[in-house]
Image: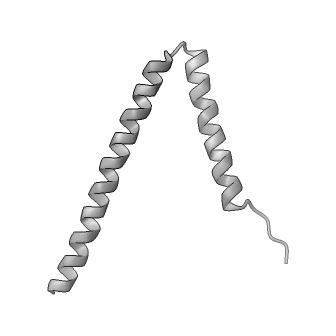
Amino acid sequence: MIKVGFKKRSLFISLLLGSLAFIAGAIFGWDLPADKALHFLLMTMLLLAIVMVAALITVLLIKLLRRLF
């Protein structure tokens, strides 16, 4: 049997490098200031943290409701 595909680790590295290349292209190609790119990064991290906390609260509420019923 022949397996074709990528390992999860190599796929993650490829996606990370692609993202970094896009960000570098935006900074250098579109003259995006580095401080503005850093601001976007921090805002993205903050929004991601908010989504993760909301997901955690949702899971905890679902588990609590299952115990009650």
Q: Residue at x 24, y 74 (%)?
A: 62
Q: Residue at x 85, y 72 (%)?
A: 2
Q: In the picture, residue 44 is in which quadrant?
A: top left
Q: In the displayed structure, would residue 14 be above or below residue 35?
A: below
- Residue 64 in the image: state x and y as whole percent: 20, 77
Task: Answer with left or right where residue 34 lies relative to residue 10.
Answer: left
- Residue furthest to the left: 68
- Residue 20 in the image: state x and y as whole percent: 61, 34
Q: Residue at x 34, y 48 (%)?
A: 49
- Residue 30 in the image: state x and y as whole percent: 55, 15
Task: Answer with left or right where residue 41 lies relative to residue 31.
Answer: left
Q: Quadrant of the N terminus?
A: bottom right
Q: Residue at x 29, y 55 (%)?
A: 53
- Residue 8 in the image: state x and y as whole percent: 66, 60
Q: Quadrant of the C terminus?
A: bottom left
The number of numbered discs placed on residues in the rendered structure image is 0
Q: In the picture, residue 65 is in which quadrant?
A: bottom left
Q: In the displayed structure, would residue 18 be above or below residue 39?
A: below
In front of the other: 13 or 1? 13
Q: In the displayed structure, would residue 17 be above or below residue 10?
A: above
- Residue furthest to the right: 1
Task: Answer with left or right where residue 26 lies relative to residue 50.
Answer: right
Q: In the picture, residue 36 is in which quadrant?
A: top left
